[in-house]
């Protein structure tokens, strides 16, 4: 007798790069920690707030801070233990077993993973040179999918769709649209402000990228009342712990604004990579990372790890490299130069 469910038997845990690397450019995190003035306020709060009670199940203060920062109605916002958790809860609460989800790859791998766990069928289409939201819309219609999900800007490709194109997609789309704006703090084409106007739209955000708060595990879903209600019913009652609620609130009310700097760094990184790797296909980016294709990607990835620099490798020939400070990027450039000399 196998006591593990059939759906889990071929699954393996998500394996991010672990270990000590002096430069971490593999997970699209911010190189900037939460500023000291915010940590000090948090420490004061912590000294007078015991953790013997459950957290606020509705995350009222945290959601209010998010709503204020992004100009949305707090009643349309739900907070999660990372947007990862919300993706999982969305699949289980807004889709029934056997419902289908459309995904154009390459995309953030957890979408298909969570859809699989909630026993949804995933229809994949491969992005090509001409990929656009029209292509995706045709695919959704052709498959009769119940839902469609994409990141904008896209992880891993960096491709961004402008606000008007996304809204036009949502209006024409017969399916539930989940638009993941995890990287929108690096760009300016968000649809967050209007997302409660569409009955078929959920927008996701996170504090893990531009805010330098990946360790807090805080994500948000914003959308129409009926969708937010269903997510609230399905999520666990105390899904966001008290520490994250308070520090997240302070982060959102503070003046952290590294998005613009890091998006400029990503453009600089792009230019420098095309000099260092003239044979590479560098994808244009609207996010805080650069995605590239190069025949020696695997060797470059391994060579970088040996030199203490972690980037993300996608088999067989792609790399995704997170933008960072000039100092960290110059260590990356030196390492790539060194590796390429050895490959000549
Ligand atoms: N969406 C996208 C597109 C991502 O790249 C990531 C993290 N890599 C997430 C969601 C999950 O973010 P969080 O840390 O909020 O769970």
Image (cartoon, grey):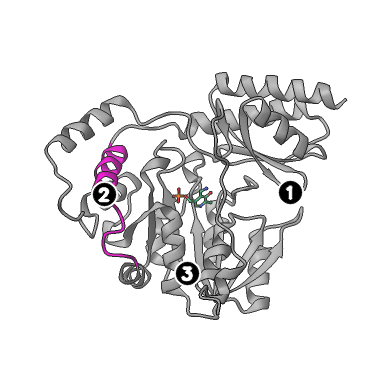
Q: Secondary structure at mark 2?
A: helix
Q: Residue furthest right?
A: 344
Most foreground residue, 219 or 286: 219
Mark 2 highlights which residue?
Answer: 62
Verify CB contact (< 8 Å) between mark 3 and mark 1: no
Name the residue rendered at 63%, 68% in the picture. Answer: 137
Q: Is residue 125 left or right of residue 196?
A: right
Chain part drawn in magenta: 235-253
x then y, percent, for residue 279: 83, 34
Residue extending farthest to the front is 1
Residue at 48% over, 49% down: 182
Sort mark 2 into few (<14), some (14-19) or many (20+) by Cα contacts within 10 Å. many
Q: In the picture, residue 28 is in which quadrant?
A: top right
236 above or below 285?
A: below
Looking at the image, residue 179 sits to the left or right of residue 276; the answer is left
Quadrant for the C terminus, please. top right
Tag nearer the camera, 3 or 2:
3
Residue, far left: 48
Tell me the number on the disc at residue 315: 1
Image height of 4 relative to 312, above or below:
below
């Amino acid at each position: 007798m196998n006591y593990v469910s059939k759906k889990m038997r071929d699954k393996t845990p998500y394996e991010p790069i672990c270990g000590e690397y002096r430069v971490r450019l593999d997970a699209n995190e911010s190189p900037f920690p939460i500023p000291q003035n915010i940590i000090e306020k948090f420490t004061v709060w912590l000294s007078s707030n015991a953790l013997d009670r459950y957290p606020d199940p509705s995350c009222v203060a945290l959601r209010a801070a998010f709503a204020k920062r992004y100009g949305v109605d707090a009643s349309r916002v739900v907070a999660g233990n990372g947007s990862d958790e919300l993706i999982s809860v969305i699949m289980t609460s807004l889709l029934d077993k056997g419902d289908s989800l459309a995904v154009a790859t390459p995309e953030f791998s957890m979408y298909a993973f969570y859809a699989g766990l909630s026993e949804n069928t995933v229809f994949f289409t491969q992005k090509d040179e001409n990929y656009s939201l029209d292509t995706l819309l045709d695919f959704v219609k052709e498959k009769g999918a119940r839902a469609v999900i994409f990141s904008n800007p896209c992880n891993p490709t960096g491709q961004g769709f402008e606000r008007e194109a996304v809204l036009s997609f949502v209006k024409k789309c017969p399916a539930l649209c989940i638009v993941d704006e995890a990287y929108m703090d690096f760009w300016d084409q968000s649809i967050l402000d209007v997302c409660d106007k569409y009955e078929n739209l959920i927008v996701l955000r996170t504090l893990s990228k531009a805010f330098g708060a990946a360790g807090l595990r805080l994500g948000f879903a914003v959308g129409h009342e009926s969708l937010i209600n269903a997510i609230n019913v399905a999520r666990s009652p105390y899904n966001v712990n008290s520490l994250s609620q308070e520090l997240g609130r302070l982060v959102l009310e503070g003046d952290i604004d590294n998005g613009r700097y890091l998006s400029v760094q990503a453009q600089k990184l792009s230019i420098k990579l095309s000099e260092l790797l003239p044979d590479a296909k560098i994808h244009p980016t609207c996010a805080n990372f650069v995605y590239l294709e190069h025949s020696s990607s695997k060797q470059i990835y391994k060579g970088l790890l040996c030199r203490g620099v972690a980037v993300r490798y996608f088999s067989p020939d792609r790399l995704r490299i997170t933008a960072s400070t000039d100092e960290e990027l110059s260590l990356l450039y030196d390492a790539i130069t060194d590796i390429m000399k050895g490959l000549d």
